[in-house]
Image: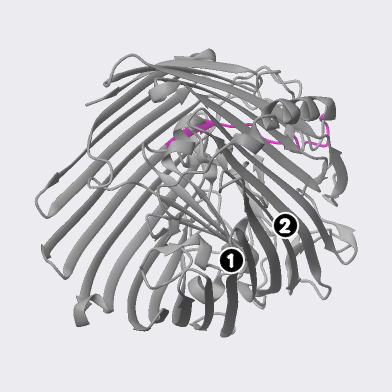
Amino acid sequence: MRSYLLTLTALCAAPALAQSADDSGPDVVVTATRSGEPTPIRDVGASITLLSPETLTDRQTRSVADILRDVPGVAVNRTTGLTQLRLRGSEANQLLVLIDGIEASDPFLSEFDFGSLVADENARIEVLRGQQSALYGSDAIGGVVHYITASGREAPGFSARVEGGTQATANAMLRAAGVAGDFDYAATGTLLTTDGAPDARKGTRDLGSDTVSAALKLNWSPLPNFRLGAVGRFTDVARDFNDQNFSVAGPSFGLVVDSPGVRSHNRNWNGLLRAELDTLGGRWTHAVTGQFTDARRDTFAFDDRTSGSQGERLKGSYETALRFDTGSIRHRVTFALDLERERFRNRDPNGFAFNGRREVKNTGLVGQYELFFGDRAGLSASVRRDDNSLFANTTTYRVQGSYAVLDGTRLHAAAGSGVKNPNLFELYGFIDGRFLGNPDLKPEKSEGWEAGVEQRLFGDRVTVGATYFENVLDDEIYTDFPPPLFTPTSLNRATKSRQHGVEAALAARFGEAWRVDAAYTYLKARENGVTEVRRPKHIASVSTTWSAPGDTASVTLVGRYNGRQLDQAFLDPSFVPTIVRLDDYVLVNLNARARLSDRFELFGRVENLFDERYEDVFSFVNPGRTAVAGVRVRL
């Protein structure tokens, strides 16, 4: 297994020292501040990874979860029914996910299913690591993933993509975008369908899925200092899945088994309206935002609905930022007010431990001060107070700084705190008598710090960086199985959960032909001295792209290594979990494209080139080798 990785690394890294970086200007992000103003990454003390539209195109990204494996600190656990992402050893529900500024997690499940997010044309992704609750409140313990689609002004024109491949896979995309004076628009639709493959170890049932999504992004500037924006998004996911065998008479208790007729149907609506006003010549800005999320989930056994849920989120925000300069020193002071209401409704026909709707309201007040010394240094301090209708009120903070000590050498450091409120299952339970809720749960709280260095070499053609981080989590919510009945219930731990590790990255470019990106993460995650599950100690990726002159063709080779990890398995009828070990694995993808003209392009890819058999979650086997080919049209 490791020999594959070493060989792949050697092949991909060979031209790295001769690669050149993009000199089109500093990369900027919007997620690291509540001011709404794009900020160069070099001025931010936090650890940030920006995945550009070109990167998503070169790696032929369809599932966003796949390319997030290339981000330092990220671990992905995928099954047919749910794809989770863990950042720096945090839990999957301790990650805030934004889509065009909209909080996208399912309010009922309290986390986001990355298996439902199919990449749009010209989209980009910002990954902000470390505690960010001082800016965004609950959920942002591990960090923030912000998926941002392109506006009509950023990427005008018409584009279409059609592809097909093994497992009866078909993918289609249409995008129409344009500009008309002060108005721009972008409308996108995607369809992804497949007959799938078995996910049980000895299964034969192919698990098919159909994902349909549509998005609309509008911007209008009726006045030079006034802007209106709107985002609408709909996702419909219908897919088969298999259950675990919990029949004491079965020979494979606790393992995933073929479950004919079992399927799910999930629908998500997201929307946002935003108004922005600039005053004092653009130095004092104001923004008012309203957004909503409506997530509905149903499961079926053949034609009978077996479970159902609905989660709703309404959120309103006001942000105001004042900017003023004193010579080469720039100041930015930001205040934000967040008003949020989440509702949960049980639609299960079998009856849960609770009935009807539950509701929680939260008011958050944010203060942020940012100081920039030319292009040499940036400092930031943030504090947030959350007043919650159900949980204890909390105050979180974050301080960070970035300093270019020499030309090409940058130091950065940050420290902060995070909070995660209990979710619905933990509070109210699951199926009556089988999972007990605990309305006295306290929010989880985290504190951490990080420090790193970034070095540019060979005339900025190569950038290397490394960051060390430490986190401590208090009042972690866990599931206990107390005797004599061993009925599971949620409790707060009295012990601490600790994570520390190192993240390293390399980006290099050799002329216009070669580009190499690599990432490595070492993580040690312990709960009271015991290794935590689904946290590999070692994760690495290497991507090499060769482009022909004039970008008429390209070939990309991507290798992703996921180290050995532990998981929980319910192999005993008492439901007391057993700790099992999952093997490490290497996934290799090969992508190629050729531009026939300014309008037409052919492409193809092979995923899991060496047909690796692997599990991200115990007894859920992931697909083997797949091949896809297609055509793209741009007008």
Expressed as whole percent of the image width and height from the top left, the position of residue 112 reads 53, 52
Expressed as whole percent of the image width and height from the top left, the position of residue 353 reads 60, 62
Say which element carries label 1.
loop
Q: Verify whether residue 100 appears in magenta.
A: no
**Label 1 packing within 10 angstroms: few (<14), some (14-19), many (20+):** many
Is 84 positioned to the left or the right of 159 in the image? right
Which residue is rendered at x = 59% and y = 78% of the image? 399
Q: Reply above or below: 293 against 613.
A: below
Label 1 is placed on what type of residue? Ala
Towards the viewer: 353 or 533: 533
Q: Main secondary structure of the magenta part?
A: loop
Disc 1 target residue: 46
Whether residue 199 is visible, yes or no, is no
Eye-nearest disc, 1 or 2: 1
Picture disc at residue 89: 2
Q: Quadrant of the C terminus?
A: top left
Quarter of the image holding residue 141?
A: bottom right
Label 2 is placed on what type of residue? Gly
- The number of numbered badges drawn on the structure is 2
The earlier-in-sequence mark between 1 and 2 is: 1
- Magenta-tinted stretch: 237-251
Expressed as whole percent of the image width and height from the top left, the position of residue 133 reads 55, 73
**Label 2 packing within 10 angstroms: few (<14), some (14-19), many (20+):** many
Q: CA distance from mark 1 to mark 2?
A: 17 Å
Is 186 positioned to the left or the right of 322 in the image? left
Quarter of the image holding residue 468?
A: bottom right
Is 2 positioned to the left or the right of 507 in the image? right
